[in-house]
Image (cartoon, helix red, strand yellow):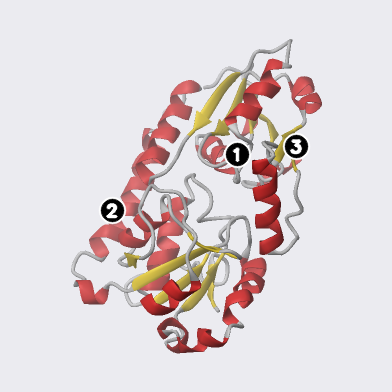
């Protein structure tokens, strides 16, 4: 059992999901404006706000992000007054991406102003599945919660995928482009290439564990992948469908192999692929279902993904 005096503020959605999976929902006293899962945490006070308009177009969002980062302003602001009231004992944040959540530097700065409580900062830095398992274990250890069963369950589900695709030849493993942003065109990296390969595909254009690169439109056309999966950062299925139109309206789009074969898909990147937490295993299962419907049927179609 965790100490009832523990008061956790989670400033990263993946971290919130890790806490919840470890049975620590009741210890969460505050969250970021992006922490929306599980539903039980929606009534917790919000401790951050964005300095940009997430309803703007992809191009505008990209420009705003670039300008804010260049002017050394963080994209997110911490509401220090809310933090001060909450008096957390622990703050969960990340040091993986300044565009995804509040930066570690900003958290440290905000904490320096909290005279009363001196919360412990736990910073996650996930780039691969292995890192996420390590984060779950570390969070468990911090709060004296056993993470073994949680990890065994997640790892077992990954192994099931691996076993089911074992017999596939290279020819049976489609080439896959995972689109993380449409303007500019960017490919999803970090843990995504690893998930694609585990699901029986060949990931294109980026390396596992590396930041997401910009993809020249010509490169997409000349490489002509078997499958294209849209998973824009922070967007649900409806918003992703809108974003995909930026590319599908281009005249060359119809010539792509994936388009002709009806193998272009949209996903709920916000719930699944963009979040380094326990639901990355759901993301793996979604990809397995998309890439090999003849082998996998988990039932995510319509909620986690759809054909474009």
Nearer mark to the viewer, of 1 and 2: 1
Determine the residue positioned at 46% across, 89% down.
255
**Residue 208, disc:** none
Quadrant that contains the C terminus: bottom right
Horizontal arrangement in the rendering, residue 4 relative to residue 179 (left or right): right
Characterize the local packing of mark 2: few (<14), some (14-19) or many (20 or more) Cα atoms within 10 angstroms. few
Q: Quadrant of residue 270?
A: bottom right
Residue 304 vs 67, above or below: the answer is below
Mark 1 Cα-neighbour bin, 10 Å: few <14, some 14–19, many ≥20: many
Mark 3–mark 1 Cα distance, whole angstroms, equals 12 Å
Q: Secondary structure at mark 3?
A: loop
Residue 238 horizontal/vertical position (percent): 66, 69
Q: Could you tell me if the residues under marks 3 and 1 are in contact, i.e. CB atoms within 8 Å?
A: no
Distance from disc 2 to disc 3, alpha carbons, whole Å, reads 37 Å
Instruction: Spot the residue most to the front.
Output: 70
For the residues bearing labels 1 and 2, Cβ distance under 8 angstroms: no
Q: First in sequence, mark 3 or 1: give its number.
A: 1
What residue is shown with label 1? 12
- Callout in the foreground (2, 3): 3
**Label ID, residue 159:** 2
Secondary element at tag 2: helix
At which x and y percent is residue 124?
49, 33
Mark 1 vs 2, N-terminal side:
1
């Amino acid at each position: 059992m965790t100490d009832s005096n523990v008061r956790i503020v989670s400033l990263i959605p993946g971290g919130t999901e890790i806490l919840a999976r470890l049975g620590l929902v009741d210890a969460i006293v505050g969250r970021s404006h992006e922490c929306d899962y599980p539903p039980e945490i929606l009534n917790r006070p919000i401790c951050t706000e964005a300095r940009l308009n997430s309803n703007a177009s992809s191009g505008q969002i990209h420009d705003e992000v670039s300008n804010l980062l260049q002017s050394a302003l963080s994209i997110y602001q911490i509401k220090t007054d809310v933090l001060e009231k909450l008096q957390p004992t622990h703050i969960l944040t990340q040091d993986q991406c300044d565009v995804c959540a509040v930066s570690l530097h900003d958290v440290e700065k905000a904490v320096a102003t909290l005279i009363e409580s001196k919360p412990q900062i736990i910073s996650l830095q996930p780039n691969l599945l292995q890192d996420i398992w390590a984060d779950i274990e570390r969070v468990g250890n911090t709060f004296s919660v056993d993470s073994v069963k949680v990890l065994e369950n997640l790892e077992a589900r990954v192994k099931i995928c691996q076993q089911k695709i074992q017999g596939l030849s290279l020819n049976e493993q489609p080439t896959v482009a995972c689109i993380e942003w449409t303007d500019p065109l960017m490919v999803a990296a970090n843990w995504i290439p690893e998930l694609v390969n585990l699901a029986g595909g060949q990931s294109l254009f980026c390396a596992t564990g590396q930041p997401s690169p910009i993809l020249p439109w010509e490169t997409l056309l000349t490489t002509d992948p078997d499958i294209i999966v849209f998973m824009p950062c922070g967007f649900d299925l409806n918003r992703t469908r809108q974003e995909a139109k930026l590319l599908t309206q281009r005249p060359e789009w119809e010539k792509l192999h994936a388009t002709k074969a009806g193998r272009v898909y949209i996903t709920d990147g916000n719930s699944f692929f963009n979040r380094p937490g326990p639901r990355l295993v759901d993301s793996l299962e979604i990809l397995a279902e998309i890439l090999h419907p003849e082998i996998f049927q988990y039932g995510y179609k319509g909620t986690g993904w759809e054909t474009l």
